[in-house]
Amino acid sequence: MNQELISRLARQTLQRCDELATCTEDSDPSLLTRTCLGEAMKKAHSLTAGWMEEAGLTVRLDGAGNLCGRRAGQEKRIVVTGSHLDTIVHAGRYDGILGVLLGIALARLMEESRVKTRLGFEVVAFADEEGVRFKQPYLGSIGYMEGLRPGLLELTDGQGISLKEALLQFGVQPDEIGRPSIAAQDMHSFFELHIEQGPVLEARGLALGIVTAIVGQRWYTARFEGQANHAGTTPMELRRDALCGAAEWILSTEELARSTPDFVATVGRIEAQPGVTNAVPGRVELTLDIRHPDDTRLRDLAKHLEERARTIAGRRQLDFFLEERSSLPAAPCSSDLMDKWEDSLQAMGLPPFRLLSGAGHDARIVALKSPISMLFIHSPRGLSHHPEESVRENDVALCLQAAWRYFQSLG
Ligand code: HGY
Ligand code: MN
Ligand code: MN
């Protein structure tokens, strides 16, 4: 294996992550915010498409706005890799992006090594994974595998623009919208290279880890409704304060998550109305993200949290509404593919450590129809969904080397 080429590609991959970090829609250009199908994504696509072509891939924009680069093999079946180019608000520059660019580096390795592969190879830059713009995650991978059905195409963003309109504005061909990008029977398997986004590999002094499964995840929008009223004249005992009800529920949620092993729960956004200093809040909307590796347990915990909210609302004479926005089962990785990663790491003299993913990934959607695997790369300080998210060049080079071995072992 050409170590010098691998080191050069790892360095180039990180430089490209820096370049893509300039494709931002944030009012502060030093911060990275790139939501799906926006102007910043257009710029990111233009750079990424150029890199795909340079690596010998044939590029297409699919019906969900995913950028796909394909290399034909001797047979029809394709190994797909990829991750997402969209980000959260004020993101790091590696979450998702690194996996896309490593896929392109792998295609470059294939070109430069002049190997003829039996299986085809496709790199996908998914258009939406984080769910920021349309408040629904994984739209890119859902569109890639299944096509975007009408219920999803009608989702609207904060400006009232529908997903369908956004796809048309982005340049997606009208007759492609809603169509899957690939037939599941043409897929050999999928693998995703991703930063760990947590502290486990760092604690063990490891560069890489093999993912066993992605936890189950549910998203909700909750609403407490009471009575807005004057902050000076409404006695405390006569108030129906929606924000106090929401606050009690948030703390109750935290208490349940803290006392339940493997359960995490997050209220990431809260909005109170009328939202002024001198009025009792009459209406509060908040988001809830809950995750657990066991689907039955997660369903029961969700039910329990809803009951707690109804009890709190009843006691405070509030109304409570809960809308489920997304519910995804835990996604196990293929044991055969995990073994192939294990062989690759062992051949490099690295420990084949296995770990669970608490973060969600595009691979979880692909897993509904195809075998998947994931390799995690050490995240320094375990920091992610934060501008200071980072990776080490040497770890990236090891990942590329492992991925090259892994791909070759698929046949
Ligand atoms: O939320 C997640 O786990 C992922 O980063 N989208
Ligand atoms: Mn993320
Ligand atoms: Mn990600």
Image (tube, grey):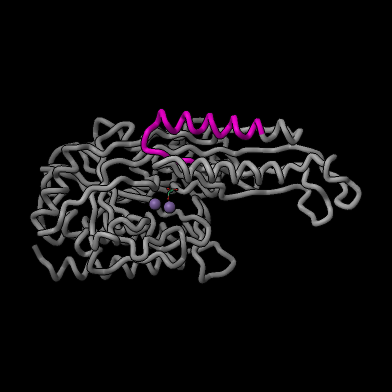
Q: Quadrant of the N terminus?
A: bottom left
| Quadrant housing the C terminus | top left
- Decide: is 54 above or below 327: below
Q: Where 381 sits versus 99, above or below?
A: below
Which x, y percent locates residue 151? 54, 31
Q: Answer with left or right where residue 261 lies relative to residue 120.
A: right
* Residue at image coords 85%, 51%: 231
Residue 64 visible to an observer of this rendering = yes
Say if residue 139 shows up in the picture. no
Q: Main secondary structure of the magenta part?
A: helix
- Name which residue lies at 32% across and 54% down: 194
Residue 160 locus on image (x, y percent): 65, 44
Residue 62, image quadrant: top left
The residue sitting at 59% across, 29% down in the picture is 307
Magenta region: 290-311
Q: Per the image, is 308 magenta?
A: yes
Q: Residue furthest right?
A: 233
How far from the left and from the top, in percent, is residue 214? 34, 41
In the rendered image, which quarter is residue 298 located in?
A: top left
Residue in the foreground of this view, choosing between 396 and 188: 396
- Is residue 29 a member of the stretch shown in magenta? no
Numbered circles on residues, count: 0
Left or right placement of residue 167 versus residue 380 in this view: right
Give me the residue at 40% from left, 64% from top: 389
Q: From the viewer's perspective, is residue 401 above or below residue 220? A: below
Please indicate whether residue 15 sits to the left or right of residue 177 in the image: left
Along the viewing direction, whichever of 390 and 65 lies nearer the viewer: 390
Closer to the camera in the image, 117 or 59: 117
